[in-house]
């Protein structure tokens, strides 16, 4: 009986620590870093960089997410979407969570310094601090532009992947960052409209709370137009071919359609559906970049 109980507690503990790393978000980020790696070279990506580079980036992103759980534990407890989180419910205490984050960050940095290059490691550390300290610690509570500026940290992984392979900065991966940078506001503000009352309750100045739903929907529309335009640039600079272009146009037009439906207010649950589509959009767009890259190589 006692053994059963401790096994269950152990299982819950393990799951709680995994939840601290925001695994679904990190997986999508790793897909973008993986694509950055493959696009950086015409030859194959060394398996050590592929494996340990992504592991290092993922561990650092997970560390940043764990710090976010610690810093936000009081506001998370106030919102229905987040109130069951390990720190919000007190299943994990702040000190062990911070030690866990430190362990992940150190492991991640050691892997990046050993198997990639110093530039990748320092850019990853800057992204970690950008999300955990600048966004979570300051911007989130300070300005409705919080996620626009903070979005840079989440947009970094394709650049990190590219630099892990090439060793230097260049225009192409910055373009990939720009795509995710333009994607983040529609991604997040759609959810923020859906969860507006909760953000207001937690006194977080998200755009729909400070400027209203109409203003937010207009900005989602504008950013989605910018996103569609920016997503065509890889084709324009001959980084990607016609398959990518076709996918970018179709995926972008569908995003625009959701943003328009949300703006018009003609469909129930349009905000959460737009949010869910945003995740599919980014996933499919980066898969298109990858498939197109290999088609171009084999032509
Ligand atoms: C500052 C920028 C960003 C903000 C404020 C933001 C915000 C959010 C929020 C609040 C959620 C709901 C999380 C949950 O309930 O678990 C979410 C979900 C998600 N985000 Fe973001 N996000 C940002 C950037 C990104 C980036 C850059 C990616 C990936 C490249 C990403 C991928 C995802 C995914 C995959 C989900 C769905 C998670 C699930 O289904 O549980 N986000 N985002
Ligand atoms: C090293 C590296 C690539 C770092 C990036 C780290 C990272 C996990 C960024 C995620 C962006 C994100 C989910 C923001 C939401 O935070 P929130 O506090 O607004 O959302 P919440 O209310 O769900 O916690």
Image (tube, helix red, strand yellow):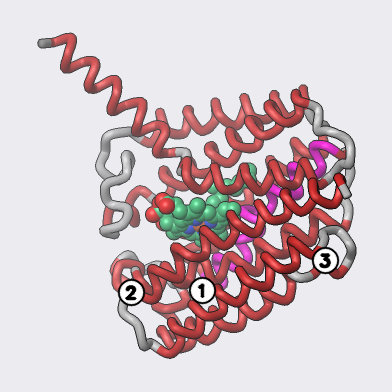
Q: Is residue 298 shown to the viewer in this render? A: yes
Residue drawn 56% across and 79% down? 256
Residue drawn 89% across and 62% down? 238
Residue drawn 50% across and 44% down? 65
Question: For the magenta stretch, what is the residue range?
Answer: 143-165
Element assignment for label 3: helix
Label disc, if present, on residue 105 of the rendered structure: none
Label 2, on which residue? 269
Q: Nearer the viewer, mark 3 or mark 2?
A: 3
Give neighbour class at mark 3: few <14, some 14-19, many 20+ (Cα, 10 Å).
some
The answer as to whether callout 2 falls within 8 Å of ligand 1 is no
In this orientation, which residue lies closer to the viewer: 92 or 272?
272
Q: Earlier in the sequence, mark 3 or mark 2?
A: 3
Label 3, on which residue? 235
Residue 12 in the magenta stretch? The answer is no
In the rendered image, residue 161, in percent from the top left (x then y), is placed at 74, 42
In the rendered image, residue 179, in percent from the top left (x then y), is placed at 70, 64
Give neighbour class at mark 2: few <14, some 14-19, many 20+ (Cα, 10 Å).
few
Element assignment for label 1: loop
Q: Is residue 137 shown to the viewer in this render? A: no
Predominant secondary structure, magenta span: helix
Q: Nearer the viewer, mark 3 or mark 1?
A: 3
Left or right of 236? Residue 21 is left
The residues tagged by marks 3 and 2 sit, at their Cα atoms, a distance apart of: 34 Å
In the displayed structure, 151 sits above or below 209; it is: above
Label 1, on which residue? 144
In this orientation, which residue lies closer to the viewer: 106 or 281?
281
The residues tagged by marks 3 and 1 sit, at their Cα atoms, a distance apart of: 33 Å
Element assignment for label 2: loop
Q: Earlier in the sequence, mark 3 or mark 1?
A: 1
Residue 160 in the magenta stretch? The answer is yes
């Amino acid at each position: 009986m006692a053994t059963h109980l401790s096994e269950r507690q152990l299982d819950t503990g393990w799951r709680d620590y995994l939840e601290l790393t925001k695994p679904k978000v990190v997986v999508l980020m790793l897909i973008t870093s993986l694509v950055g790696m493959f696009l950086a070279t015409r030859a194959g990506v060394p398996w050590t960089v592929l494996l340990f580079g992504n592991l290092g980036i993922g561990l650092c992103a997970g560390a940043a997410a764990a710090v976010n759980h610690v810093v936000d534990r009081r506001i998370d407890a106030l919102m229905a979407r987040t109130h069951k989180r390990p720190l919000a419910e007190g299943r994990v205490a702040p000190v062990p969570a911070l030690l866990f984050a430190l362990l992940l960050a150190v492991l991640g940095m050691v892997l990046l310094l050993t198997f990639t290059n110093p530039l990748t490691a320092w850019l990853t550390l800057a992204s970690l601090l950008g999300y955990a300290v600048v966004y979570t610690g300051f911007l989130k509570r300070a300005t409705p532009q919080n996620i626009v500026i903070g979005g840079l940290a989440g947009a970094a992984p394709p650049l990190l992947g590219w630099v892990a392979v090439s060793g230097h900065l260049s225009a192409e991966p910055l373009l990939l960052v720009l795509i995710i940078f333009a994607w983040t506001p529609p991604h997040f503000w759609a959810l923020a409209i859906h969860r507006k009352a909760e953000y207001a309750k937690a006194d977080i100045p998200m755009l729909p709370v400070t400027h209203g739903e109409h203003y937010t929907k207009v900005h989602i529309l504008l950013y989605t137009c910018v996103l569609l335009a920016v997503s065509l640039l890889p084709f324009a600079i001959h980084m990607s071919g016609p398959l990518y272009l076709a996918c970018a146009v179709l995926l972008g037009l569908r995003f625009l359609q959701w943003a328009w439906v949300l703006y018009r207010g003609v469909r129930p649950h349009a905000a959460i559906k737009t949010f869910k589509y945003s995740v599919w959009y980014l996933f499919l767009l980066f898969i298109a970049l990858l498939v197109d890259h290999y088609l171009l190589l084999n032509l």
